[in-house]
Structure formats: C-alpha cells, structure tokens
Amino acid sequence: MKEIVIAAPRGFCAGVDRAISIVERALEVFGVPLYVHHEIVHNKYVVESLRAKGVIFVDSIDEIPHDQTVIFSAHGVSPAVTKAAKEKNLKILDATCPLVTKVHIEARRYARDGYQIVLIGHKDHIEARGTYGEAPDQITIVETLDDIEALEFTKDVKLAYITQTTLSVRDTRGLIERLKERFPQIEGPNSSDICYATTNRQEAVSVIAPNTDVMFVIGSKNSSNSNRLKEIAEAQGTKAYLIDNADDLKAEYFANGIEKIGLTAGASAPEILVRKVTERLRNEFGFNSIKEVRLKNEDVTFKLPTELKGP
C-alpha cells in the first residue's frame, strides 16, 4: 500500500505564528494602508494571502510615505532601517522573531566590548543582513569552510562568533569547529543561536527520510530553513523536492515504483498547504495510507506587542 509519512513537528514555528498574527491584528487595529518591510515570512502563500487583504510589502523604507504604519518582518532589520523609519515618522511594529533578536543583542554586546565578530550565515539572506547591520565595521559573514580559511585575524584579536538562526545544525557544527581550530581564542554565545524549531524539524527529517523513497518539503525557494530540510533529506540518501504547494507535484516524481513518501513543511509554511498536498497525493496519486511520526511536542509561544493586545 502506498503510504505518506508526515513529520511532526512541522510548519509554523512560534516566531512565524507571532509575525503573521501581528500583521493580521494590525489590519484590524490600524486598517490599510499597512506596510511590511520585506516579506513578513518567506512563504509565497502567506505573502499573497496578506497582500490580498491590502498589505503592501516593500524592500525599502523609501517606498513608504511619511506618517504610515510599518511592520518589520520576522527576520529582523538593521539599525539603519529603524533610523530611516523614525526619520519618516512611521509607526513601527516589530515582528522580529525573539530568537533573531537574541542574536542582534549578542552582536551589539560583542561589538560594544571590542570584539571582531564572525557571523555564520548566508550573505544574501535578509536575517544575516539585518544582524550584520548592527556592527558592519566589526562583523564578517562566513558561509563555507573556504570563507573561514580566508579569515586573517591574528591570535591577539578579541574574536567571537554568532550564527543565523535558520541554518543546519550539522553544517554549523563543522564551521564552528573549524573556527575554534584556527582561532583558539574565539568565544561564542552561551546557548546555540540555531532556532529550536529549526532543530526539531531537521531532526524529524533525519529520522523519516532514510525510511522513505522520496521526501517532499513544503516551503518557498527563498526560505532558508526549508532549503536546509531538503538538504538534510538528501544527505540521508533520499531524493527530495522543495515544493510551494500541491500544484508543484509532478507525475514524474512518482515513477520507478515509489511506495512511501515523506512529507514535512518549513517553519514558514502553513498547515493548509500540508492538507492540500496530502489530499492530492491521496486522490490523484493513490497514497491512501497516512501516518504521522512525531518526535517532539512544541509549546513555545511569543507575545504580541503591547499596542496590539486585545482588551
């Protein structure tokens, strides 16, 4: 019998849930126009749903008229973006994930104490750019071992590392180990910067993928954590596909006797997409047996900003 094995935890994390709730609540309280700096989360379905309600997504504060309301996305922003918003007298609602805020605080602390900072992250990712903006003269972003080999810090330099929250635990571990080998004096945060939800979803894929013929990860192409889930499945020797929604399923994916499918969703992908993918797998491709494999329960929640709390 053809079977779907659905990973749990999957989908929305507490930071994403909070960010989307901030936008939806702000629509109720302030109405439109409502501006969001960058995509609130990296998911096409979520962004298009909010755009249909009148939300305007912008890449620059310059695109927002004076005296409007702006929401900073879950990925965080640099101090320069906050300064630009204040100069235009914008009402700011900060939807930055608290776990990203933790990394910003670490960057500011290390910078204040005179450290050079190595930020492990993707140089073109909005989260890494926001963190980098906390101390651009003291932060160097590295993505690969080659980047670390190119660093030229001397042994007497005060040095610290921080990481982007949505990276692969496995890849980050190797980079941190090499940093410590090259620079024994390097310091790190008291606790890992990798998001708990990122870790939980990666562990679930690591367990499920080896026992499936193919793994589907629901998430948008610009979602860092979704891409890491695909890579982890592939590292287990399982063919994996990153799909935005049920329409992305292709008959060719099920050739050569595919009998067992693994299914998960990135931290910015809503559960409705999981249901729609499951329905199509069942109705069109004959995967009638559905089993959920749950590794952990998540009960983390983050509060909304005071000005958006109900009576």
Image: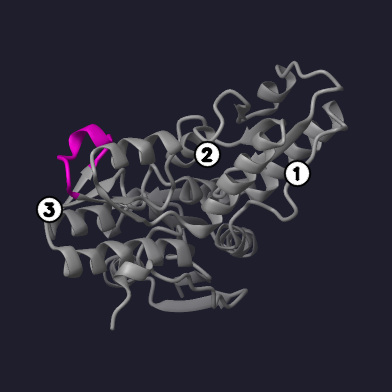
Task: Using a 10 Å C-alpha cutoff, classify the residue at mark 2 as few (fewer than 14 neighbours), some (14 to 19) or many (20 or more).
Answer: many
Question: Which span is picked out in magenta?
Answer: 58-68
- Kind of element beneath mark 1: loop
Of callouts 1 and 3, which one flags the residue occurring earlier in the amino acid sequence? Answer: 3
Q: Compare marks 2 and 3 and give the one earlier in the sequence.
A: 3
Image quadrant occupied by the C terminus: bottom left
Q: Looking at the picture, how far across and down is residue 36, in whole percent?
A: 26, 49
Residue at x 45% of width, y 57% of height: 266
Q: Which residue is mark 2?
A: 131
Say which amino acid is labelled 2.
Thr
The amino acid at mark 1 is: Gly
The answer to whether the residues at label 2 and label 3 have Cβ atoms under 8 Å apart is no
Task: Write the residue at 46% across / 62% down.
Answer: 15
Taking depth in this image into account, of 9 and 5 the one nearest to the observer is 9
Q: Nearer the viewer, residue 147 or 106?
A: 106
Chief secondary structure of the magenta span? loop
Q: CA distance from mark 2 to mark 3?
A: 28 Å
Q: CA distance from mark 1 to mark 3?
A: 42 Å
Left or right side of 291 for 171: right
- Residue 281 lies in the magenta-colored region: no
* Residue 80 position in % (x across, y down): 40, 33
Amino acid tagged 3: Pro
60 within the magenta span? yes
Q: Which residue is mark 1?
A: 188
Tag 2 secondary structure: helix
* Residue assigned mark 3: 33
